[in-house]
Amino acid sequence: MAERSTAAVDVADNSGDEPLTAKADQSTSDGVAQNRERETDSEEAQGSGGTESPGKASPPELHSGHKLARRYRLEECVTRLDGFSSWRAVDEKLRRAVGVHLLPADHPRARSVLAAARSSALLGDPRFVQVLDAVEENDLVYVVHEWLPDATELTALLASGPLEVHEAYQMVSQVSQAMAAAHREGLAHLRLTPSAVLRTSTGQWRIRGLAVNAALRGISSETPQRTDTEAIGALLYAALTQRWPYDNDAYGLSGLPKGVGLIAPDQVRAGVHRGLSELAMRALANDGATASRHETPCTTPEELVKAIAEMPRIRPPEPTFTAPPEYQRTSYQQGYGRPAPHMGATQPVTAPPPPLQSRTGKALKWAVSALLIAALGLGSWQLAETLMQHSKSDDTQKTKTTDGNGKGTDKTKPVKQLTIQNAVEYYPDGKSQHPNDVKLTYDKDSSTYWRTYSYRGGPTLAPFKQGVGIVYDLGSTQSLSAASIGLYYPGDHTTATLYATDSLSSSAPLTSMTEIATGTTSDTNLKVSAKKPVKTRYVLLWLTAVPHADGDQYSNAGYKQAITDVKFTG
């Protein structure tokens, strides 16, 4: 099975299961040690079906240091349950951390685990923690998957309190869109708990254990879409209230009081966003009944995605700025180097000298006035002559000292190149191009590139595909004015549009973004400039038209494009 270049893996979801070392701190997926809370695996808490009996199969007797396929070295057992075990391991070939699920080949669930892992791997959606390998070898079945060292479980995030409203909105939006894409491919999760949802350091939400976690535990459902939709509703409920929406405690969260039934989040905690509260109630099971003030229940992730799209967009909180200190007038400004007088103090006024009143004084005044007039006339004549002599040199200098803006200076505002910190492929239709190659567009190597697939229709991709693109993270809010895009294929025309967006999301709708500028070229270099700088941290580069190119070693002839270098300036 093809391997991926992503640097990470999650461990098996052992929430609610007895850890290998009881009462000991364990390393979670984000690398932070913490005590895991026991969950309740009841049907009400999980929203899923029953489990199969594991039979008499026992977990393989393995130890730290054991190697699988002469490649995966087991480091630490993090779960041992129901005849299977989960390990943190090291892929010695690619020198990266991975996670491994292990169970005997004669385990009653071995076949279903292999099938679930291979189906999940074929999906190839980066919103899910990826399955890297699924093998049956030497009486063992093992599944290798990504490890995410920079990610934090929703369980850990909720330990300190409810999520901020925009964060909860992003979580439910991204998780719903990902699960809708999975169900379109016939895949369900069935164990979508707070420990299965991770937030990366870039703010992107990812889901681990798609199909595999349920297969390991023998969980099934006759209504998988409804099961996953209720689970998303429970996640949103917990994110808004820091409470589990049932009358039992689970995942480190307190349940609702017994006997009160399912009550809306805005009745549990003050200040909860009304729209998100109603959304959670529409997704959760409520014995077939829905409160009169709520709209039609959502029974599939796709319906949940549509309901979110119909909500008014929730914007991120405005950044807080510290007010500058109050302006203080200095003594220099008050008196040109003299100390400022004290308020209320009376300053002595010097009387002016008496005017010249005598006949001699009057004659002296007329003489002085005549001299001043003569001096002014002579000075004006000399000044005019000097100006005329230098008029030609002034005209010559004018072309040198006047810039294109007519401001009389040869200095222009310096251009600042913005640093790209991270990037993800953007594909709101759930069909990616080559998400693992996006980093090649800003690696300062023109010989490497990210490429699209080859399409039969073009140059405009619509209506077959609205576009393809990449979202870039500038690390912090920057003033963006232009972009220089290096392209691999010339000919026909390439059209690219820059959008300002709120997060490093691979599926946020274009309608939620702000268009910055658009450019078109038939060459291999495209420059896109904004009419005025736009402040943003995340920038989407969106291709809507690509040229026709011949076939090569990577793809057939057709309409396609590849991006070699991207540079943003501010």
Image (cartoon, grey):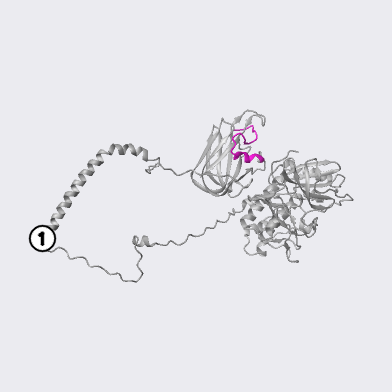
- Is residue 218 visible in this depiction of the protein? no
Horizontal relation, residue 24 to residue 447: left or right = right
**Image quadrant occupied by the N terminus:** top right
Observer-nearest residue: 280 or 471?
A: 471
At 49% across and 60% down in the image, what residue appears? 323
Q: Is residue 294 above or below residue 205?
A: below
At 25% across and 39% down in the image, what residue appears? 388
The segment highlighted magenta reads 436-458
Query: Any magenta on residue 441?
Result: yes
Crowding at dot 1, Cα within 10 Å, few <14 / some 14-19 / many 20+, comes out as few
Horizontal relation, residue 375 to residue 200: left or right = left
Q: Number of marks in the image?
A: 1
- The residue at the far right in this view is 56
Q: Quadrant of residue 240?
A: bottom right
At 57% across and 34% down in the image, what residue appears? 487
Q: Quadrant of residue 452?
A: top right
Which residue, given by chain and number where applicable, does mark 1 sit on? 360
Q: Is residue 122 above or below residue 201?
A: above
Which x, y percent locates residue 320? Answer: 54, 58
- The residue at the far top in this view is 550
Indicate the amino acid at tag 1: Thr
What main secondary structure does the magenta stretch of the protein show?
A: loop
Which x, y percent locates residue 109? Answer: 84, 47
- Is residue 68 visible in this depiction of the protein? yes
Horizontal relation, residue 531 to residue 104: left or right = left
Observer-nearest residue: 63 or 117?
A: 63
Which x, y percent locates residue 211? Answer: 76, 47
Name the secondary structure under disc 1.
helix
Which x, y percent locates residue 27? Answer: 73, 54
